[in-house]
Amino acid sequence: MKEPTSVRTKDPSPTKKDFIEWSDTLSVGVQEIDDQHKGLAAMVNEMSEGIKGGWGKEARDEVLTRLVEYTKVHFATEESLMSISNYPAINTHKKQHEQLIDMVGAHIKKYDEDPNASNYDLLFFLKRWLVEHIMKDDKAMGEHLIKHSPMKKTGDSFFGRLKRLFGFGNKKMPAPAKA
């Protein structure tokens, strides 16, 4: 799967703005999740640029496919972290994830059935859903993860936190015996 391009945090030109501009207000305080959110925003921005640039169905579908696949990876990451930390709202949060996948699927079906359907409907839906979900639900989850799990270091990776959680790498290995 192609990794998402980075999201500009500062606008290099006064006339060019990202459709979703990343700022610290969107940070949930967990580096792995924040990095994935930036990747999701970058893909929505890529889709926005393509729509403005007059991309055809094939190009739009390629970005949309990558976005859906990356979103599934992101949701699996969040759901794993919620499970490990016994997040009390995990079922509600997972349901929201399932609903998004279903809604995007409905948009894709609409495009397949009606080639004249507006791409902007999906674009604005994705922006609204992503920003609102981050600001409300993911921030609450992030606060829980920081307070109630061994996954507190913002700069630590997901796998680094799992290693710490399960005790891998906490003990020095004995030096190999000399022959």
Image (cartoon, rainbow, N blue to C red):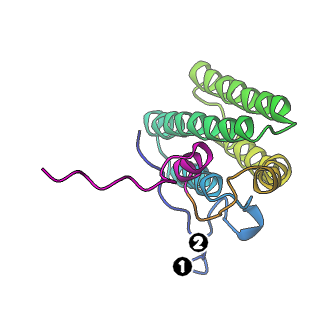
Give percent across and percent down for residue 70. 54, 39
Mark 1 vs mark 2, foreground winner is 1
Vertical side of 8 occupied by 159: above or below: above
Q: Is residue 128 left or right of residue 10?
A: right
User: Who's the residue at 72% across and 49% down the image?
Assistant: 127
Location of the N terminus by quadrant is top left
Magenta run includes residue 72: no
- How far apart are the alpha carbons under marks 1 and 2? 8 Å
What residue occupies the far left of the structure in this picture? Answer: 179
List x then y, in percent, for residue 73: 56, 37
Image quarter of residue 121: top right
Quarter where residue 156 is shown: bottom right
Residue 12, label in figure: 1
Give the dominant element type of the magenta stretch: helix, strand or loop.
Answer: loop
What is the secondary structure assignment of the residue under circle 1? loop
- Closer-to-camera residue (43/17): 43
Q: Which residue does the image show at 65% across and 63% down from the upper left?
A: 153
Q: Nearer the viewer, residue 175 or 80?
A: 175
Q: Amino acid at mark 1?
A: Pro
Q: Are marks 1 and 2 in contact (CB under 8 Å)?
A: yes
* Magenta span includes 178: yes
| On screen, residue 152 above or below 123 | below
Q: Residues within 10 Å of mark 1 (few under 14, many from 20)?
A: few
Q: Of helix, strand and loop, which one carries label 2? A: loop
| Residue located beneath label 2 in the image | 16
Query: Compared with residue 155, is residue 129 higher up or lower down, i.e. above or below?
Result: above
Looking at the picture, which amino acid does disc 2 mark? Answer: Lys
Residue interval drawn in magenta: 157-179
Q: Nearer the viewer, residue 118 or 90?
A: 90
Q: Name the one closer to the observer, 25 or 146.
A: 146
> Mark 2: few, some, or many residues within 10 Å (few <14, many ≥20)?
few
